[in-house]
Amino acid sequence: MSEETPRLIPRLRLKSGDTIALGPGKAQLLELIQQHRSISAAARALKMSYRRAWLLVNTMNTCFQKPLVLTATGGNQGGGAELSEEGLKVLTLYRQYEKAIAKRPELADLEALLSGPHTPSA
Amino acid sequence: MSEETPRLIPRLRLKSGDTIALGPGKAQLLELIQQHRSISAAARALKMSYRRAWLLVNTMNTCFQKPLVLTATGGNQGGGAELSEEGLKVLTLYRQYEKAIAKRPELADLEALLSGPHTPSA
C-alpha cells in the first residue's frame, strides 16, 4: 500500500448485555493502572476524574468473574492498585484481538474505497 | 459452549481520522435505506430524525471515494434513495468483517472469563 492510502482504524467494543465490558478506553485505563499502580494516577494521565475511572473499573470488575483491578485499600485513592492475573489476561487477549482485527482483509478492502488521504489528528 | 455461557457481542467502529466512517448504527442505516428505498423511511424505522439520518449518510458519502447512498432528488425527503454499487460493496464488506471478528478465538477466551450468565435485554 502506498503512503497515500487513507487509513481506517478499527475500534472494538465488547458488549455484555447492555454494558460495554471492554473497549478502547477501558483497555487503555487498565494499561495505565498497571503502569502507574494507581487508579488516580491513571485517571490523571487520561484527564479523567477519579470518580469516572473508578466507575469504569467497577463496571469491568462486575462484568468479569474475578476483578480485573485490585486495590490495596478499598475506596482510598492513595492506596495503590494493580491488575489481577485475570486483568492481565483480559488486557492481553483484548490487545491480541485488536491486532487480529487490524490484519483482516476486509479492512484493507474498505480502506481502498476511502476518499483521502486523511491526516489523522494528533 | 453451554447455553449458560455469557455472551460478549463485538461492536466494530471504523475511524477515518476523527470521523467514524462506519459502525453498527451506520451499517444498519445503510441496510434500511436499501430495504425501504428511502432515507426518511429508514430514519423512521430507527426512530431517528430525518436530519440525523441525512447527516450520517453525508458523513459516509464524504468518507468514501464515491457516495454510498444515491438520492433521486437531492434534498427532497420524498425523492427515494438507494445504495450505490459502492454502498452495497461497503455494507457487504462490513458484514463479512463483523462475522470474521465474531469467530475469533480471543472472543471465546474473553467470554469464558465473564461473570454471568447475562440476559441481554431485547
Image: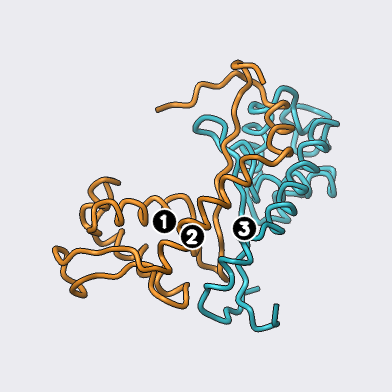
Chain colours: A cyan, B orange
Q: In screen coordinates, is A35 left or right of A15?
A: right
Which quadrant of the view contains residue B107?
top right
Q: Residue at x 63, y 20 (%)?
A: B5
Which dot marks residue A110?
Answer: none
Q: Residue at x 73, y 27 (%)?
A: B113
Q: Which residue is mark 1?
A: B26
Q: Dot 3: few (<14), some (14–19), or many (≥20) neighbours within 10 Å?
A: some
Counting the numbered discs, the total is 3
Q: Secondary structure at mark 1?
A: helix
Amino acid at circle 2: Leu
Q: In screen coordinates, is A13 left or right of A38?
A: left
Please state which of residues A35 and A4 is positioned toward the viewer in this rendering.
Answer: A4
Q: In screen coordinates, is B34 left or right of B63?
A: left
Q: Which residue is mark 2?
A: B22
Amino acid at circle 1: Lys
Q: Dot 2: few (<14), some (14–19), or many (≥20) neighbours within 10 Å?
A: many
Q: CA distance from mark 3 to mark 1?
A: 15 Å
Placement of B65 over or under B118, stated as above or below: below
Query: What is the chain letter for disc 3?
Result: A
Determine if marks 3 and 2 fall on one subunit.
no
Q: CA distance from mark 2 to mark 1?
A: 6 Å
Query: What is the chain letter for disc 1?
Result: B
